[in-house]
Image: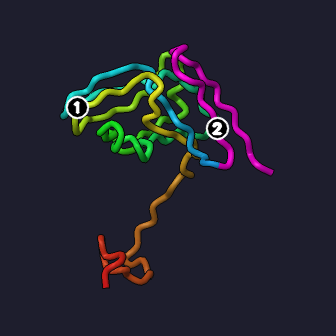
């Protein structure tokens, strides 16, 4: 049986479209800009996503750009991947996307610029020191695909 989780959401803008889960297409959910912004090449900006959420206990959200974000807007997410934990759950804890522009660009309200999914917290980890790991070496960093 498929597990279903409920996320409480507060919309800070009546202009943005409501979030939706598109079953069968992807388990990532698109997030939209809640503001129209002009960003000059080299500028940093926190783009307001217009939502606050209360994630299920034991979960965190991972936010990444959509595959078309760089092509369409010339934006790079400065954190490369954002993580929002379950404690960021107040009405004023608005989700944002930190970006830097590689060209002059404009983002309009409702432009889909990033996506998120939730995942369980990592289990508690204990590190056990050893003199050897015992596995076979793959060839070092960057060696995959080389002869």
Query: In the picture provided, is 20 more to the left or to the right than 82?
Result: right
Q: Quadrant of the C terminus?
A: bottom left
Q: Which residues are magenta?
A: 1-24
Whichever of labels 2 and 1 marks the residue nearer the N terminus, that label is: 2
Q: Is residue 110 magenta?
A: no
Q: Residues within 10 Å of mark 2 (few under 14, many from 20)?
A: few
Residue 9 position within the rendered picture, expressed as x and y whole percent measured from the top left: 60, 24
Residue at (48%, 21%) from the top-left corner? 50
**Which residue is the extreme one toward the right?**
1
Compared with 75, 50 (above or below) is: above
Q: Is residue 108 visible?
A: yes
Residue at (56%, 44%) from the top-left corner? 28
Residue 123 position within the rendered picture, expressed as x and y whole percent measured from the top left: 56, 52
Q: Residues within 10 Å of mark 1 (few under 14, many from 20)?
A: some
Q: What residue would you read off at disc 2? A: 21
Q: What residue would you read off at disc 1? A: 104
Compared with 109, 139 (above or below) is: below
Distance between mark 2 and mark 1 Cα atoms: 32 Å
Q: Main secondary structure of the magenta part?
A: loop
């Amino acid at each position: 049986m498929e597990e279903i989780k409920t996320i409480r959401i507060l919309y800070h803008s009546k202009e943005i479209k409501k979030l939706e889960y598109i079953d069968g297409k992807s388990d990532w959910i698109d997030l939209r800009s809640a503001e129209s912004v002009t960003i000059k090449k080299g500028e940093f900006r926190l783009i307001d996503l217009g939502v606050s959420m209360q994630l299920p206990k034991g979960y965190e959200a991972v936010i990444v750009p959509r595959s078309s974000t760089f092509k369409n807007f010339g934006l790079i997410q400065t954190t490369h991947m954002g993580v929002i934990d379950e404690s960021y759950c107040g009405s004023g804890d608005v989700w944002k996307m930190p970006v830097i522009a590689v060209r002059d660009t404009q983002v309009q309200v409702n432009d889909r610029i990033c996506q998120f999914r939730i995942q369980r917290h990592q289990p508690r980890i204990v590190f056990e020191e050893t003199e050897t790991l015992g596995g076979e070496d793959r060839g070092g960093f960057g060696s995959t695909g080389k002869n």
